[in-house]
Amino acid sequence: MGYTTLNEETAKEYARTKTSVFAAEADLVCKEIGDGNLNMVFRIEDRGDPSRSVVIKQSLPHARIDDSIHAPLDRARIESEMLVLHDKHCPGLAPKIFDYDREMYAIVMEDLSDHIVLRKGLIRGTKYPRLAEDMGQFLARSLFFTSDLGMDPLEKKELQKRFVNPDLCKITEDLVFSNPYFDADNNKIDPEIRDRAEENWRDEELKKEVAILKEKFMTQAQALIHGDLHTGSVFVTPESTKSFDPEFGFFGPMGFDIGAILGNLILNHASQLWHKPDDADRKDFREYLLSTFKGIWETFSTQFRALWEEHVTTPMESNPVYREDYIERLFADAIGYAGCKMTRRIVGLAQVEDIRSIEDADVRATAQIAVLDTAREFIMKRHSFASIDDVIAVVRKHQK
Ligand code: SR1
Ligand code: MG
């Protein structure tokens, strides 16, 4: 049998016959639960024994959000292999894979319905006490152990062959690093912020810095990065954190992953102008977001340094001056990429629920402009911030 797209009926039969989770006579229920921009995701449960359930994620031959965008089916293989590596390097911080079907481009994986997508949890105003530590650890371990520091450079180059992902990289090159900076057809710009978006289009210095970050994204095979680590790619409970959906994975700059999660926390910070109308509540939740922002960077950098000290023994790389310079460069990259990821979610094709769910157009515009101003300063000043507190001061200045 070749590739066919699953639906709620056929996914049940697929789960019954292709996995060993369900008995042949089990009464199954299936729901399509995908809320991303690209794929179909089905949750299948045994009505007689709800503790038995799986998730099946299948690639479509195009993006779900826009069928003119080419997204090859093979991204499901990349995702399944990435998840296996994440589980190996970061145990407990990624979903378990049960099977990958090469003909159907379908991944059968652990059902995490007892978790919630982080973006949704933050919109509701829930605090996740483990998030900073878990994300910092996930970033440090997944990036270190797939870089030339944490693996043999020959083996790394072999591994690179499995993670060449040109079409999904092209989506990022267009939607993150190009289209937001000119009048592209698929941008989505609310009329209230059109003038502010156009200011960026005329800002040649800003566009030069974004072009430098884009060049690094396209050319620096530093580590195997998740490639799309926003708050919609993390499942949480107060006790657990799982990164998922790494179909954009490829060998790229580490700072792109760190910046993705940091930038999305700041998008949520801006959106609380609407979601938490009470001043004291909003202040309290924003403090939580900023302490998580700081905690992710601090856990990442501390853990990354510890892994370096423990594992790196080669003469050139064990130099502590080089190590500290490397971490400083990661910091600047992370803040720059955070700015790019924030801007694309305000003016680009794929926007975020944090901001889009703001019903009042004036409040939404205030939040959107605050994000664009914060993002511009992140990108322009990324080399001159002395600490993460200096970066947080920029957020506080623009998002009162
Ligand atoms: C066409 S896909 C649009 C966006 O969704 C994904 O989550 C990535 O962020 C991509 O840029
Ligand atoms: Mg996704």
Image (cartoon, rainbow, N blue to C red):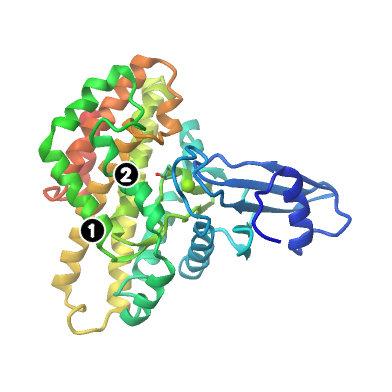
Left or right placement of residue 362 versus residue 163 in this view: left
- Three-letter amino acid code at the position of disc 1: Leu
- Three-letter amino acid code at the position of disc 2: Asp
Q: Residues within 10 Å of mark 1 (few under 14, many from 20)?
A: some
Q: Could you say which is closer to the camera, residue 312 or residue 255?
A: 255
> SS class of the residue under badge 1?
helix
List the single residue furthest toward the right. 25
Splitting the image into four quadrants, where does ligand 1 fall?
Answer: top left
Considering only vertical position in the picture, is 53 above or below 162? above
Residue shown at 21% from the left, 79% from the top: 318
Report the number of discs: 2
Q: Could you say which is closer to the camera, residue 397 or residue 104?
A: 104
Note whether ligand 1 is within 8 Å of mark 2: no
> SS class of the residue under badge 2?
helix
Mark 2 vs mark 1, CA separation in Å: 23 Å
Q: Position of residue 43 (x, y in %)?
A: 68, 47
Quarter of the rendering containing residue 151: bottom left
- For label 1, the residue is 330
Q: Mark 2 or mark 1, which is nearer to you?
A: 2
**Rendered-image quadrant of the N terminus:** bottom right
In this orientation, does residue 316 appear?
yes
Q: Residues within 10 Å of mark 2 (few under 14, many from 20)?
A: some
Q: Position of residue 262 (x, y in %)?
A: 33, 46
- Identify the mark nearer the N-term, 2 or 1: 2
As drawn, the label of residue 85 is: none
**Rendered-image quadrant of the C terminus:** top left
Quarter of the rendering containing residue 343: top left
- For label 2, the residue is 174
Considering only vertical position in the picture, is 233 above or below 283? below
Residue shown at 14% from the left, 30% from the top: 202
Q: Could you say which is closer to the camera, residue 378 or residue 282?
A: 378
